[in-house]
Amino acid sequence: MPQRNMNFRQGLMDMLDNMPRGTICIEDLEIGMVRYLRKQVTDRDIEMFAEVSTDHNPVHLDDDYAQDTIFEGRIAHGMLTAGLISAVIGEQLPGHGTVYLGQSLKFMAPVRPGDVVYAEVKVTAIDHARRRVTLETHCAVGDTVVVKGEALVLAPSRKFD
């Protein structure tokens, strides 16, 4: 397969989601709305996250070191995985113009290089008067939930555009 096609295919594998990018204004949100993405976590993702965050913990970067930990191998940064939740919120639900107000996170299991992470966001409450939206959030690898939590966001509104 030519290199160009392999890069394109890898790009598709890196991020597969269910909806186009954009904005859903608070006036159009409904309880139970769900959006998600899937992304394969690569060695490059982990290395780039280490550079940006300045978190160079060897459990993420050094195979020999990580082999002797409780994880018995390298793992992705937990916040890299949680960042996929942010991607769904900022790109899909509610999308562009959303302001994060808070996020609780519980890390349940490790994500390893090569894992495909499924990140999902679900609307659980809407406060139209204050433009606040509560979202149930989680990430999974296969059937294993690796991160779960709840986000509170300020949703965009047509009234302010």
Image (cartoon, helix red, strand yellow):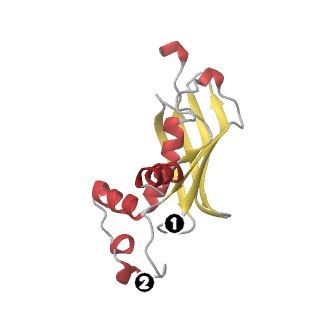
Please name the residue shown 56% across and 25% down the image.
Answer: 131
Q: At numbered mark 2, what does the secondary structure look like: helix, strand or loop? A: helix
User: Label 1 amino acid?
Assistant: Val
Task: Give coordinates of residue 118: x percent, y percent.
Answer: 59, 54
Residue 45, how many percent across, how many down?
39, 58
| Depicted 151 relative to depicted 99: above or below | below
Residue drawn at (63%, 20%), measured in percent from left and top? 27
Residue 48: x, y in percent? 33, 57
Q: Nearer the viewer, residue 11 or 127?
A: 11
Q: Nearer the viewer, residue 137 or 49?
A: 49
Name the residue that disc number 2 marks: 67
Disc 1 element: loop
Which numbered circle lies on residue 18? Answer: none
Q: Residues within 10 Å of mark 1 (few under 14, many from 20)?
A: many
**Residue drawn 55% across the image and 35% down it:** 92
Q: Position of residue 47 (x, y in %)?
A: 33, 62
Work out which residue is located at the far right of the displayed protein and give it: 32
Pointers 2 and 1 in contact (C-beta within 8 Å): no
Q: How many marks?
A: 2
Residue 141 is left or right of residue 52, and the answer is: right
Residue in view at x 29 percent, y 54 percent: 52
* Sequence-earlier tag: 2 or 1: 2
Residue corresponding to mark 1: 111
Residue 92 relative to residue 29: left or right? left
- The three-letter amino acid code for the residue at tag 2 is Gln
